[in-house]
Amino acid sequence: MALTGVLRPGFAQVRVLSMEDALVHYRDRIGLNVVSTGDDGRVYMKAYDEFDHHSIVLRECDEAGLDMMAFKVENEIALKEYEEKLLKEGIAVDHIAIGEQPGVGRRISFVAPTGHRFDLYAEMELSTKGPLVKNPDLWRTEPKGMKALRFDHCLLYGSDVDGTKKIFEDILGFTMTECIKEEDGTLIAIFLSCGNKAHDLALVRHEEDNKLHHVSFLVEDWTSIRDAADIITRYDISRDIGPTRHGITRGQTIYFFDPSGNRNEVFSGGYSFYPGDPTRVWEMPNVGKAIFYYEQQLNDRFMNVVT
Amino acid sequence: MAGHKNIFFKKNMTRHTKKEFRIFIEGHDDQIPCPGDKSVLKNMEMRGLTHIAVGCRGGGCGVCKVRVISGAYTISKMAVGKVTKEERKLGYALACCLYTRGDLKIRLIQI
């Protein structure tokens, strides 16, 4: 299968209460590289194994949370097609000019029924600090902190999960790989993939719209999760839960909070998804195991604390 | 008028003191020792006390909101939507961002 249409998550713009504290967290602890700082104070960052200019944007603000999540699409033709389809479904589309973020081409932007803003773009300049391509060593300089490989996905909370699901499936070509379902068929949580990953975007039904549950980064393996846990304790980072494993996606994981209270995850593993694979379904009596495979029970903080 | 005193600190000012104070929780008998360089929430967690709900510990989620009834304290950055400017004047604070500068009497809030 050729990967077409929406290729992958591109970047997330995260609000932080203190840029100074956030930089220590995302740069020194998670291990992202600072690419540039904008005139408006936004800081652009990327993981060491990412080619594009940036994947995380930090914006200092008096509220925590997520400004938007953006996906990279195949090309300009695909971008135009998505705009037409969104408009046809009655969804308002905004245009974000080239260069609103450094190195990023024009974006289209819409607000999903769960209240979240999503952007789509086709072009982003390559970073000069991207992975090597000629007789490539593993990295240019040794990775720092938790050694995050890439920004991987977001989990978002909002009320009209079905509405956002419809847009991502019907217009943007995502597939629901896995879900948690009530007995009456109500979807409590959905996991959506635009490629071969177990998830690129996850949504959980929640009374308040436009909430961020977590921004996730991929790390190499289970040992990296242990090393992340060591860093979390050493630097007194606010830990949520883990190291553990999810039943859903099978990812090995640890959750923690940035200094502004936004939840982060570093994870490894998870299955590959291919078109035609059936959706994995978790029923409510098994929800504990679905979320935390070893603990087999939920905890209130993980389920209810969002920014 | 409430007897709380919020000592705002300037950037780079040393805001925490290692000196130990006491926390009284309204309706509870405990006197909880709390050093000035640990947030009230962190101090509670370290002592295994569960009076206050623990969320993000970073001033973003709002679940550890309390009201200071009396005593001097400082606060670090909190999300404005979780504790408004008006509420701050009335002694509301997130326990994860609350540092004692004297003995504190606090009221628990159901979020």
Image (cartoon, rainbow, N blue to C red):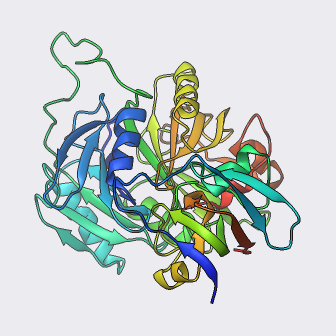
The answer to whether residue A9 is seen in the rendering is: no
User: A172 left or right of A121?
Assistant: right
Based on the displayed image, in which of its 4 quarters is residue A250 positioned? top right
In front here: A301 or B83?
B83
- For the C terminus of chain B, the quadrant is bottom right
User: B29 left or right of A32?
Assistant: right
Q: Is residue B48 above or below residue A40?
A: above
Identify the residue at horizontal 27%, vertical 63% (top origin).
A82
User: B10 left or right of A165?
Assistant: left
Q: How many marks?
A: 0
The residue furthest bottom is: B1
Q: Is residue A235 above or below residue B84?
A: above
Q: Residue A41: percent from the left, percent from the top?
A: 21, 57
The answer to whether residue A92 is seen in the rendering is: yes
Q: Residue B20: percent from the left, percent from the top?
A: 66, 50
In front here: A140 or B38?
B38
Identify the residue at horizontal 72%, vertical 48% (top origin).
B45
Q: In this view, does B91 lie above or below A141?
A: below
Q: Residue A234: percent from the left, percent from the top?
A: 54, 29
- For the N terminus of chain B, the quadrant is bottom right
Q: Is residue B22 above or below residue A271?
A: below
In front here: A249 or A79?
A249
The residue furthest right is: B29
Q: Residue A17: percent from the left, percent from the top?
A: 40, 60
